[in-house]
Amino acid sequence: MPQHSTLRVGDIMTRDVSAVGVDEPLQEVAKRMGRERVSGFPVVADGRVVGVISEGDLVRRFRALRIPLFVDVLGGVFPVGSLAEVERAIREIAAVKVSDLMSRPAVTARPDWTLEQASEEMIRRRVNRLPVVDAEGRLVGIVTRA
């Protein structure tokens, strides 16, 4: 009779996983999320996973920015407030880096974890993805709720 084997994270993880660096501009990360059709990335520094950046992090950040409103008057779009406020908001958005916003430390999994261990960790830590790391903390894959 064959022995029943438990599925492990390493059996189902996505091995070809995109990551971002700590110094990448948030604008570029947001574009990559759209292009790659993902809702988040592991963040790496010196080859090791140090955090995670997600759509939720981006939404919370941009909601917190005081971006001036614009009004449409007879087909022309005008800022409510000064042009200096608009320029300040644009500079502030452009200056934000991944390291300013990422969730840290990263909640990670190991390839030898059972799927039950990974799902319990996702629920307990309220995360949708777990970067999978080797013994040195290097990214080897990712497992998501999907």
Image (cartoon, rainbow, N blue to C red):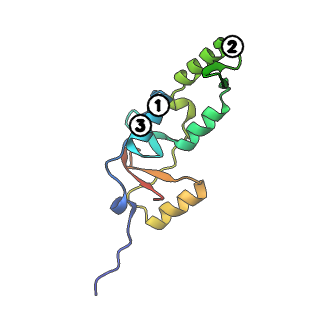
C-alpha separation, residue under disc 3 versus residue under disc 1: 15 Å
Q: What element carries label 2?
A: loop
* Image location of residue 140, percent across then percent down: 35, 48
10 Å crowding of disc 2: few (<14), some (14-19), many (20+): few
C-alpha separation, residue under disc 2 versus residue under disc 3: 32 Å
Q: In this view, does 118 lie above or below 89?
A: below
* Image location of residue 114, percent across then percent down: 43, 65
Q: What element carries label 1?
A: loop
Q: State the residue position of label 2.
A: 82
92 with respect to 131 (left or right): right
* Image location of residue 136, percent across then percent down: 39, 44
Query: Does the residue at mark 3 contact the one at mark 1 (Cβ under 8 Å)?
Result: no
* Mark 3 or 1: the one toward you: 3
Q: State the residue position of label 3.
A: 32
Furthest residue toward right: 81
Q: State the residue position of label 1.
A: 22
Identified by mark 2, the residue type is Ser
Q: In which quarter of the image is residue 89?
A: top right
In the image, what residue occupies the spot 56% across and 40% down? 103
